[in-house]
Each structure stands twice: as C-alpha cells, then as structure tokens.
Image (tube, helix red, strand yellow):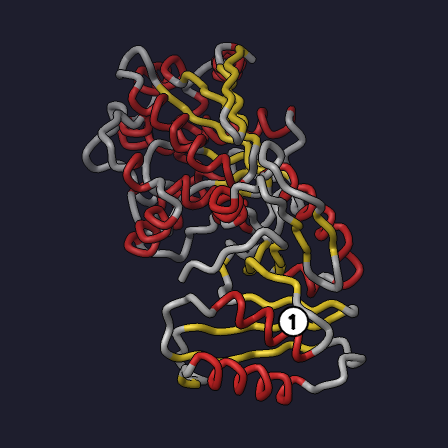
Amino acid sequence: MAIRGEHVIIIHYSEIGLKKGNRRYFEDKLSRNILESLADLSTGQLRIDYGRFLLFLNKESPLDEIVKRLRNVMGIAYFCIAYEGDWDITGLCDKILSRIRNVNFHSFCVRTRRTDKQFPLPSPEINRIVGAKIQSDLNKKVDLTNPELACNIEIYNKQVFFYFERIPGRRGLPVGGSGRVISLLSAGIDSPVASYLMMKRGCRILFVHFHNFPITNKASYHNAIRLAKKLTPFQLVTKIFLVPLIQIQENIILNAPVKLRLILYRRMMLRIAARIAQKNRCKALVTGESLGQVASQTLENIVAISEAVDLPILRPLIGMDKEEIIQLAKNIETFDISIEPFDDCCSYLVPENPETRAKPDQVHDAEKRLGDWQTLIDRALQDAEIVTLTFPEQTHVAAE
C-alpha cells in the first residue's frame, strides 16, 4: 500500500526506553547514528520528542532511500511515514480522508494513542468518529483484527500525527553504546552473523581476518572484505585487519603434534586479535563458535583455546543450531557470499580427525616446542593490512 507524503517520519526506539538514568546517553547515540546514516541525503531537522524521534522531510528528500537506511539503524523498533493532523476532530477526519480516498482497500481500523489529555476527546471516541467518517464517505468495512488498512493516530505534546504503516527496524541498542570489540571474521557463514548480533547489542565491531596467501589463493581475503562491506551499513564505519598467518602455521606444522594443529592455530589467532584489541581500545573478542558444531568447538577445545588470552570472548551463536544461523545470514544478506568457495586458513593441513577433547597440559607442552612464536606474532602484525570501509561507500587500504 503506497501512501506517500513529504512531512515527517516518526521513529520509535526499542529498549532504550528502559535505560532510566542512561536513557539520554543512548538517545544521543541513536540520534547521531540516524544523522550519520542519512548525512548525504536531503532531509530536514531531526529532534527527540516525548520518547520518539521526529525526522522532518522536504520535497527533495529521497523517501525510498531514507526508508532503506533507517531499516538498518540499530536501536529503532519501528518507524512511520506520518502526516500532521489537526487538533480539531473535523479537520483531522478531512486530512485522513484526503490521504486514503484514492487508495485501494476494502477493510480498515482506527487506532489512537492519546498521551496529551488536553485533546478534548478520549481515544475510543476518536476511533469511533474517524472510523464512522471513513465508513460513511468511502463505504469501507471495519475490521479490528485483520484490516487491509490501519489508520494510526498519535496525539501528544499538543501535536497530532497519523500514519498507515509501521516499518520494522532492527531493534536492539544503537551501535557505539556498548563499546568496541574485535570480531574474528572468517569468510564463512557463522562469524558475520555473530558480528551482526553484537552490533545489535550496541557494539562497534573491528574485524580481524586471517589468511595464508600465497600458499592458498586470495578468495577468503576478498570474501572477508565483501562480508565486512555488507555489514558496514549497520555501523557506518568499519575497519578490517587482514593478517597473514602462514609463517605461524608453518612453525606449528613443523613442530607440533598433528592432532593439535587446529587448536594451536586458534590460540595464535586469539593472541593476535587480543593485541589488536589492546591497541584499539576494544574490551572483548567475538567469535562465531556454536557449541559442538565442529571439532574445534567442543567444550574441552573451547576451554583449551580460550585460555590463551585474558580478554573476554563473546560467543553470541553458542547455543544456536546451523539452520538458525543460516536463516539469520540470509536475513542480513551475507549468506550468498559466505557459501562461495574459499580456502579457510584454519583447515590448512589439518588432519581428518583432529583432537576433539584437548587437555590443557598437552596444549602447553605443544606450544613449548614452537620456539619463539612471539616474534612470529609480531611479524604477522607488522605485515597486516588495514581496510577501512564507510557507508556510503569509500574504501582506503593501508599497512598497519
């Protein structure tokens, strides 16, 4: 149903309203994120107004693009393309009729939310009067449970607005409100979804991707950048660190037990990610692990891998099954990229039956055989590339 105008978008936020003493902080974060997401578009003023945002539009405002971008702003519960109504009930009815007279629908309902008690009529009476006017003038049927058109009226702070559609947002908390974290981004299905879920909880994500080019091709390298680019509209600016792991892997292959290779790879990855986190003021690491999904994700192996670093490791997918993760990947449009063929550096020369129940003392003994692995970590960090992605799109590549 296309009912368009050029007046105002009402934006309702999600759980920010429950933050009490910190509510203003999160409102400011959300306001800044909305403005930054629309910075290159023609819009009017954005203001906070009684627990909602009002975004005023003008004739040049590209409504479709604004709607598309607002859908991706974390913290928004829903938003509406709204029209200013009259304080007088007769004028309000006339304005509503003028918007829907040429719209094709058979059934309707009217729902009023009146928080300003100075308006002379209570909500049920407003519903009755507006509904009777639509019914008599347009000969439409009232349906309170499954209407084809819902006329929503909001009355607050001496203002009247009406709208016909609620456009769902991503909900959650505004990005930046919960601090910065490092996400270990592979080119597969899970880690982009884990990153998205942490953005939804208000975290700003910095990505670290490990590759073993030139031993393998650069497919995972390029796919990781494409995945980070796909996720960037949710947080507007993204850094991805592309770290070569091949020298560390070769050292492990030459000196460590075959069955422990994967665990040792992962421990080194965490150490490198923790170093990047420390330098970039990040408070935790994020992985796409789901308990029991693959050999490295048994409880014993997760414990053995996690003890390599002191930083908290957040695992938002830990209790999800693969179908749930795939559905989310499709929802955020990362799935098609993630299923493209690539050589995963974690699978490089890993045996068919890797260790699934590693014991910490075995892992410690294996690492003692690796010699000066700290120098190899330093070298990997020196050779890392940094790609900065922004939305709208700009890309800059630099060595660390």
Q: Quadrant of residue 345?
A: top left
Q: Nearer the viewer, residue 319 or 94?
A: 94
Work out whether 187 lies above or below 6: above
Q: Position of residue 281 (x, y in %)?
A: 67, 31
Q: Position of residue 155 (x, y in %)?
A: 70, 73
Q: Quadrant of residue 142?
A: bottom left
Per the image, label 1 sits on a secondary structure element best described as strand
Residue 96 appears left or right of 158: left
Is residue 311 visible to the viewer in this orientation of the structure?
no
Q: Name the residue rendered at 49%, 26% in the picture.
A: 393
Q: Nearer the viewer, residue 48 or 311?
A: 48
Is residue 234 visible to the viewer in this orientation of the structure?
yes
Work out whether 254 lies above or below 119: above
Identified by mark 1, the residue type is Glu
Q: Nearer the viewer, residue 223 or 129?
A: 129
| Residue, disc 1 | 154
| Quarter containing the N terminus | bottom left
| Quarter containing the C terminus | top right
Looking at the rendered structure, the number of numbered marks drawn on it comes to 1
Task: Determine the residue located farthest toward the left in the rendered image.
Answer: 352
The local crowd at label 1, few if under 14, some if 14 to 19, many if 20 or more residues have their Cα within 10 Å, is many
